[in-house]
Amino acid sequence: MLMESDYMKKNIIALIMVLSFYIFVFSFSFASSDVNLVVNGKDITDLSNPVIKDDRTLIPVRFVSEELGAEVIWNNDDRTVLIKKNDESMLLKIDSKIVNYNNNDFYQVSDVAPIIINDRTYVPVRLVSNGLGAYIDWDNNTRTVVVDSERKSEIKPFYEISFNETNKLIYVSSEKDIEINIPKEYQNENYNLKLFLFDRDSYSGYIVSKEKATKDILKYKPKVEDDGEKIFIVGLFDNDNNWVMGDIKKAFINVIPKIGGEVDKNCSITPEINFLAKYIDYEIKNLNTGNVTTIEKRDPYDKYKFTPSGAGTINYAITIKASDFSGNEYISDEIMFQTYLIKELELVGINNNMTISKSDNLLAKRNFDVLETTYYIKDEKTGVEEVLATIPYGSYEWNPTKEDEGNKLLKVSVIDTKGIRHDSDYVKVAVDFSPYLKIKGIGPKQVISKETKISSESNVELDNLYFVLKNNDNGDKRILSSGIIDGSFMYIPNENDEGNVSITAYGVYNGEIIKSDTVDFKVYFGETYGPKPIIKKDEFLEFVSKMAIESYEKTDMSAALQTAQAILESGWGQSVPVDKYSNKFSYNLFGIKGTGTDGSVISNTWEVYNGVVYRIDDYFRAYNNAFESWKDHKRILLELSRYQIFRDVMYNDTLGAWSIRRAGYATDPKYPIKLMDIIERYNLKELDKVDL
């Protein structure tokens, strides 16, 4: 026969077996109060007012518990209800499905969170049955709930899913595989597993791992900052992110940081870190020379390839430094690595079959030290070879002349530190000193509205130079300038130039006219408009975080990361593209080019022509509102195949920041660090916090 404490413990355990993650809303529509409640033969219907919600009978926990001899203590500060009977206790928190037994001895998850109705705490009647060891019966004729503590109640598990861990808690000191027992019928692509790490006091936390339910292992990489007593919750969800079932387990996190890595034959370093790091630094020391190279703030979850320097056998000592989110560094032991490289020598700065018509820098690309470097030119037809220059090391600026015209062979020869000579392969080039003329300072599709400096480039000394402007709308032409000595002038557009125009340079050399390519551009004197705010700066965070949270709840894409991206891409919402000519507002928060739900707007982007950077018009997506922009950005990340590596970890802001760059979203190597700094500075991590 069970002692009372054992009996209650058994029934308290069973209490949560009838619980799930179903979330109550606060707009209740109850059936008429015609349900009666009898506890140990005493009718307390008038006192308790049981109600029916969604075919479930809810009763006020205080009245029933006290009738069964238990003490009920309400804490208004943290909105908790403590039920005590003898040495056993059960702690419930309003609006939380987590139930705490015997002062953190163990936990369970309920299917219905305790709720407040008319200043009373209501719970499902079955919870009282299992928690306090009372038998529950239903008399349909009189619509009466009968609670009888003299009779024993059956305890059956509510959920079939469970942690595959027999100990009372899961101990974590390093990256760990968390094994889950999943019912066979749910082991398919229609369901997802999520692992949550919750604080045991606040009953809230974060998603720390996610997999398709086809796998029964969730990989958990702890943060050093997670150290302490925690709660693990595993949840099974359908593809619409609806809760299906789950389990809960105590956890103790005590991270013992370990950092290491491997270097393969291609000189790629794969870091091995047993905790979640913010970033890593590499220190690569050439033991032959003592030279040290430091690579800072790199992706902790991707390989890094370095280029060895020197020929022959080179020994390296590589150290990896991993930083946590509190600014602490953890340093690996030295990783010893050896390379053996054959001495290589190559003439660079020119390519095979290249046509040379102006000066060019020649350079000896080598992987060993030298005492002397000599550049040679050889006539392919006569076979005569001449020295262009002999220098200790470095590049040589070759200025071919008219006499050099024809097919030539170039090479570089060096003498190493042991006095041994090495020759590169020949590079075949064609020296063509045919006169050419190029326009610089203005590029195709550029829009001009004020004076602009235009210049030219030629490989010969011109006797005369002038520029002709053509109005492509009406065919009118005019000479802009002639007799230019230094090859440049200030173009001042006038009203007759407005519209689509083109410019061509003409030069005179030895009595012949040399013509440049024609550059089409646009002259515009009307009003132009630049980026504008979408909202006041101090209101932007609240504005975008609402959309981020909504997206997070549907997709598990970190709301912190989404918000940080919006802040970074739009300058806190103060630099949103508008149409340069019509002032049409785009609502484009992420600067995406193309056509959106409201067409496009014309804005500026950058191009390069003949070595000069300039602005041109380009088309950016326009939307009817900010929500459409937000939705389109999420669609790109959720649907394009290149972002699969991001989707695999998008629940975590750190993993997501590194993977989104790895997927090609941004070319800036500091992009992930910028996002993480914004998240940290404005405490955006709170946007990803969830409770039950």
Image: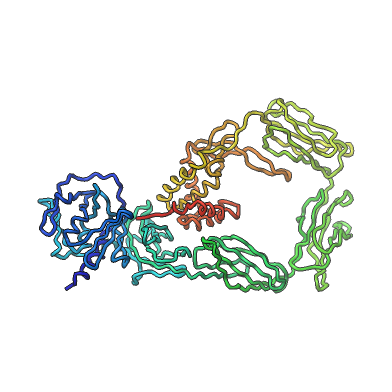
Q: Tell me residue 175's x, y (percent).
A: 46, 68
Location of residue 239 with respect to 132 vertically, above or below? above
Count of number-bearing discs: 0
Left or right of 452? Residue 164 is: left
Q: Tell me residue 222's x, y (percent).
A: 46, 64
Residue depicted at x 22% and y 45% = 30
Residue depicted at x 83% and y 54% = 398
Q: Quadrant of the N terminus?
A: bottom left
Location of residue 493 with respect to 561 vertically, above or below? above
In-front residue for pair 347/674? 674
Please identify the quarter of the rendering in which residue 616 is found.
top right
In-front residue for pair 506/163? 163
Left or right of 160? Residue 637 is: right
Please identify the quarter of the rendering in which residue 184 is found.
bottom left
Please identify the quarter of the rendering in which residue 492 is found.
top right
Q: Tell me residue 524's x, y (percent).
A: 66, 30
Q: In which quarter of the image is the C terminus?
A: bottom left
Residue depicted at x 81% and y 48% = 357
Left or right of 480? Residue 545 is: left
Left or right of 340? Residue 620 is: left
Q: Tell me residue 221's x, y (percent).
A: 46, 64
Q: Taking the image as drawn, is residue 398 in sight?
A: yes
In-front residue for pair 180/422? 180
Q: Taking the image as drawn, is residue 195 in sight?
A: no
